[in-house]
Amino acid sequence: MGRIVVLACLVALAVPVSGGAAGGRDVRAIRGLLQQQLTLLKQGKFRQSYTLTTPSFRSHCPYPRFLRQAREARRRLGPSAQVDRVRVDFKTRRRALVEYRVLKNGKLFMWVRFSRGDRYAKLGTRWYDDYDQLKC
């Protein structure tokens, strides 16, 4: 019985909050992008992280400003930062809001709620970070 409950929870995590997108594939892509961004941040690969944003984001957030904020985020988060409890709310087939927790040393550092407007956009076949009220 316990395995069924765990399996049901894992399946629930893989299903999008709202319909209209490619389901699990898009959810996995967005989660993967979020993890990739955190990995690049921790490695100090800021230029690569910047390329994971939409052209719209880059037009409103020049790289020097992004770089300053990314360096500060890296300093504050440290090498042990993790992201978990990622949830995706698809507004359209190509737009989504993302909610997640950021952990530092295994403890809650920040909870990014849907209300914060962390948006992702699908351009072509790939998802990109579109807008984040915490940056730029």
Image (tube, grey):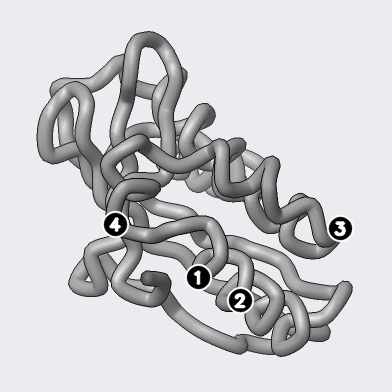
The kind of residue tagged 3 is Gln
The kind of residue tagged 4 is His
> Can you tell which of label 2 and label 3 is closer to the viewer?
2
> Can you tell which of label 3 and label 1 is closer to the viewer?
1
Q: CA distance from mark 2 to mark 4?
A: 15 Å
**Local secondary structure at mark 4:** helix
- Position of residue 69 measured from the top left corner of the image (x, y, whole percent): 56, 76
Q: CA distance from mark 4 to mark 3?
A: 25 Å
User: Splitting the image into 4 quarters, where does residue 109 fall?
Assistant: bottom right
* The N terminus sits in image quarter: top right
Badge number at residue 60: 4
**Local secondary structure at mark 1:** helix
Residue at x-position 53% and y-position 41%: 31
Q: Are marks 2 and 3 in contact (CB under 8 Å)?
A: no
User: Splitting the image into 4 quarters, where does residue 122 fall?
Assistant: top left
Q: Which sits earlier in the primary sequence, circle 3 or circle 1? A: 3
Residue at x-position 14% and y-position 22%: 20
Relative vertical location of residue 35 with respect to residue 8 in this rendering, above or below: below
**Local secondary structure at mark 3:** helix
Circle 1 packing at 10 Å, graded few (<14), some (14-19), many (20+), is few
The kind of residue tagged 2 is Arg
